[in-house]
Image (tube, rainbow, N blue to C red):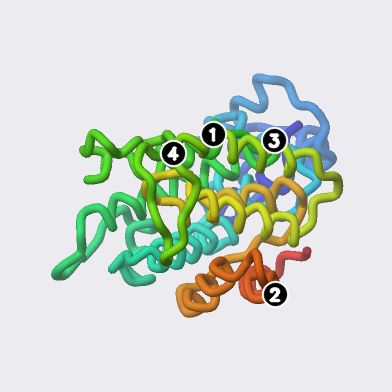
Amino acid sequence: MISYEILEKTLKYRGIGKTELSTQLGLSSRTIAKIGKGEKLSNRTLQRIADYLGMDPKHLMKEVSENKILQVLREEKEMKLPGGLYHELQVRMTYNSNHIEGSKLSEDQTRMIFETNTLDVGDGIPVDDVLETVHHFRAIDYVIDIAEDELTEDIIKQLHFIIKHDTKDSTFGWFAVGDYKKRANVVGGRETSKPSDVHKHMMDLLNEYNTKENVTLEDIIALHAEFEYIHPFQDGNGRVGRLVALKECLRHGVIPFIIEDANKNYYYRGLSEWRNEKGWLTDTCLDGQDTFKRLMDMLEIQY
């Protein structure tokens, strides 16, 4: 059905009143009332409204999710609404997730790329930092689109492909973009899953996780930690792992968490000590959830 909320936000953003819409298109008061009630419109009327607003008709149709946060993200994504939850999630999560992994781009530079598709790079910014920033924006879009699907290896591999394709790493024959690692790797002095074991370990993790009922934040944190212990890809595991956690929060109606670069050391300590002490990582993720809650409060979005 057509979404009055989507239409109202679009009209407000473009400075068009409902009276103007009705006058310009010759819509009757009955049609406007039907829109307000979310009742079905004729394809012709829907197309006329969409054409007037320069939108695809499907973007005025409400794809209802029980998850309020996911619904807001999807609507704002389709509207390309500036300054909303979708906009700020893109900038803040992309900046922090990339900076944790060593990106030299500042939050202001990240914001500039998202908002204007341009960048005043200054000196010493690696090309891959810019590419992976743009790729991370697309990866968040992908997460929002498929949020309610069951988590699979294919989804996880696709996230890795989105992040790492066209980067310098993708030119190396031994670097498997969008596929599991071919060479063993060590993280913080800790051995990770051997390449020959990755598929089995990932399937075991996903099978155990996907059979859970009433998934909680703690379940998602555990999934994230065990994913990082497996470390299935040659590089990009942290970013993919945090995107997976975002997806699963949206899938299960859990308020997402954004790990801020300022908490990087606590985050790394929490991952390192996860199997001995779960509290450190849990507390860091709860702090990241508070960050997301403050963002929602600022935008007056209920949760």
Is residue 196 found left or right of 295 in the rendered image?
Answer: left
Marks 2 and 4: which is nearer the front?
4
> Who is closer to the viewer here, 32 or 81?
81
Nearest to N terminus: mark 3 or mark 4: 3
> What amino acid is found at the position of numbered circle 4 in the picture?
Pro
Determine which residue is flagged by label 1.
199
Determine which residue is flagged by label 2.
279
Seen as rendered, the residue at the extreme left is: 123
Residue 105 drawn at (x, y percent): 30, 67
Determine which residue is flagged by label 3.
150
Task: Say whether marks 3 and 1 touch (CB < 8 Å).
Answer: no
Nearest to N terminus: mark 2 or mark 4: 4
Marks 3 and 1: which is nearer the front?
1
Marks 3 and 2: which is nearer the front?
2
Callout 2 secondary element: helix
Real-space Cα separation, disc 4 to disc 1, in angstroms: 8 Å
> What amino acid is found at the position of numbered circle 2 in the picture?
Gly
Above or below: residue 206 compared with residue 240: above
Are there few (<14), some (14-19), or many (20+) residues within 10 Å of tag 3? few
Determine which residue is flagged by label 4.
195
Nearest to N terminus: mark 1 or mark 2: 1
Q: Quadrant of residue 290?
A: bottom right
Q: Residue at x 20, y 64 (%)?
A: 125
Above or below: residue 195 compared with residue 302: above
> Who is closer to the viewer here, 180 or 17?
180
Callout 1 secondary element: helix
Q: Is residue 297 visible?
A: no
